[in-house]
Image (cartoon, helix red, strand yellow):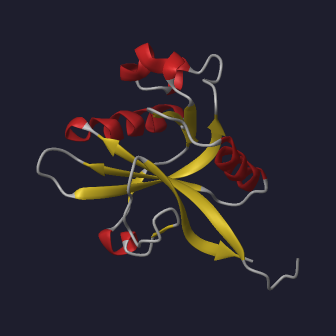
Amino acid sequence: MSSTAKVSLQHIIVRVRSEEGRTVSSHLEIIKTRGVVLFAKIGKGISSGMQQALNDQIDKGVPTYFFMATFDGWDQPFSIYQANLAKVHDNFPDGRHDIVPSYLNDRIGTIETWFELTSLDKVHPDEVKRIHILSSGKEGWIQGRSATLINGSGG
């Protein structure tokens, strides 16, 4: 591939229902104390092809992101959070209960996809407008529970 060729970067966005912002706060607390957290994709996991594409991109040293779309609480605005994605797992990593929010302990065995995150920051509303959702073709909008998105390209 020539040095001028453009390569699409893939990232993932997941829609989350959070009671009073507790999903964000519980994950942030673990990142602050442990430097990493496992985020569970509740319900159907992502495809093995998408998981492989994300992990291949990460293994090549390409910055890869996990986005979370959530309402921060009743009658609150819709928010997007961005995280550095370190790895995607299709099974719970052995011995890593220390980096999972306690409210997930009873569900660990039922979760098909785990995202290993090393940061979690709120995205400014102006930046949200720059997100392009591949699965819907829309800007800054997610339909369903998860989607592949493109947030730029690399050369």
Q: Judge by depth and name the residue closer to the eye, 116 or 138.
A: 138
The correct choice, above or below, for 28 with respect to 97 in the image is below
Question: In the orientation shown, which residue stands out farthest toward the bottom?
Answer: 4
x%, y% of residue 30? 44, 32
x%, y% of residue 36? 55, 37
Q: Judge by depth and name the residue closer to the eye, 122 or 44.
A: 44
Q: Looking at the image, which residue is at 59% across and 48% down?
A: 85
The correct choice, above or below, for 149 with respect to 39 in the image is below
x%, y% of residue 87? 65, 42
The correct choice, above or below, for 14 with respect to 103 in the image is below
Q: Looking at the image, which residue is at 36% across and 64% down?
A: 141
* Direction from residue 103 to residue 86 in the image, left or right: right
Question: In the orientation shown, which residue stands out farthest toward the right?
Answer: 1
Question: In the orientation shown, which residue stands out farthest toward the left?
Answer: 75
* Direction from residue 138 to residue 134 in the image, left or right: right
x%, y% of residue 58? 71, 52
Instruction: Locate the N terminus and report the quarter of the image it occupies.
Output: bottom right
Figure quadrant of residue 143: bottom left
Q: Looking at the image, which residue is at 56% across and 52% down?
A: 84
Q: How many marks?
A: 0
* Direction from residue 19 to residue 101 in the image, left or right: right
Instruction: Locate the C terminus and report the quarter of the image it occupies.
Output: bottom right
Q: Looking at the image, which residue is at 36% across and 57% down?
A: 80
Figure quadrant of residue 28: top left
